[in-house]
Image (cartoon, grey):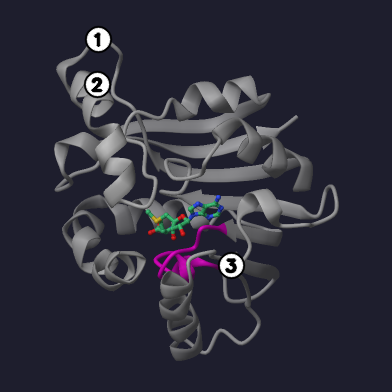
Amino acid sequence: MSFLRAFFYDSLLAKSEEACLTEWRSELVKHVHGNVLEIGAGTGANILFYPKNGIELTLSEPDKHMRTQLEEKVKDEGLDHVTISSHTIEENHKPDATFDCVVSTLVCCSVPNLASAFSEIKRILKPDGYFIFLEHVGAEKGTRRRRWQNRLTPLWCKISGNCHLNRETEIAFKNAGFTFKEIKRESMRKATPLVRPTIRGIAIKN
Ligand SMILES: C[S@@+](CC[C@H](N)C(=O)[O-])C[C@H]1O[C@@H](n2cnc3c(N)ncnc32)[C@H](O)[C@@H]1O
């Protein structure tokens, strides 16, 4: 299943990439500086948007099939300075305050426990560090879309690598003690209606 997911991943996202995701990714990733960790880097959808110089970049991706594609793209693009790791965010073993920026795009829906993941990201970020995010999230409570997200999440998790349709990621940021430098809420165009609500922006470690 993991092999198939990785194999079809880029094609499944292609229409949304063209409609909005590529633009959102490039706008967000340009804010990185210093020592940067991207978690759940997948097949490498963000790699072209990182500055070519002046940053130290680690891409982590625990799924070996996704990671194989990531490694190929990094090699094809000649990004020799990039480090690739297989760690999940929960087991990254980095010292406190290692990174200036952590980047996460479409990953928070899949981590086993969002509060633990956010606490770990906070630990490895330097003070005032940037948590740059683009995530699909639960629709507003009480809406028809949210009811369908709630109903279908258990099945969706099984077929989509633990992807939760109804994650309350914005609330989790606040509970973890991040503050938003900027946040945008927008519909992911050309996506299945269940994953359309998104948030993106920069959260700051206080
Ligand atoms: C939907 S894909 C997103 C890939 C890529 N970031 C993108 O924007 O297209 C979710 C990725 O998160 C990874 N992932 C799942 N749980 C994770 C965790 N606990 N820590 C780090 N990455 C995780 C998966 O292996 C998968 O590659």
Query: Contact (CB < 8 A) between labels 2 and 1?
Result: yes
* Label 2 CA crowd tier, 10 Å (few <14, some 14–19, many 20+): some
Disc assigned to residue 146: 2
Q: Nearer the viewer, mark 2 or mark 3?
A: 2
Q: Which residue is mark 1?
A: 142
Residue kind at label 3, given as amino acid type = Leu
Instruction: Give the alpha-carbon distance from disc 1 to disc 3, as whole Å.
Output: 37 Å
- Which residue appears at 20% of the width and 35% of the height? 194
Label 1 SS: loop
How far apart, in angstroms, are the residues tagged by discs 2 and 3?
32 Å
Picture coordinates of residue 74 (x, y %)? 50, 82
Residue 31 x, y percent position in the rendering = 57, 53
Quadrant in which residue 94 is drawn: bottom right
Residue at horizontal 65 percent and vertical 44 percent from the top: 130
Q: Nearer the viewer, residue 154 or 51?
A: 154
| Residue 96 horizontal side relative to residue 47, left or right | right
Which label was assigned to residue 43?
A: none
Give the left or right position of residue 156, taking residue 72 as reference: left
Q: Which of disc 3 and disc 2 is earlier in sequence?
A: 3
Position of 14 relative to 147 (above/below) = below
| Amino acid type for the residue under numbered disc 1 | Gly
Q: Check disc 1: other Cα within 10 Å, few if <14, some if 14-19, many if 20+.
A: few
Q: Check disc 3 and report the residue beneath it.
A: 59
Query: Which of the two labelled residues, at mark 1 and mark 3, occupies the earlier sequence position?
Result: 3
Q: Give the CA separation, mark 2 to mark 1.
A: 7 Å
**Disc 2 residue type (three-letter):** Arg
Start-end of magenta stretch:
39-50
Quadrant showing the N terminus: bottom left
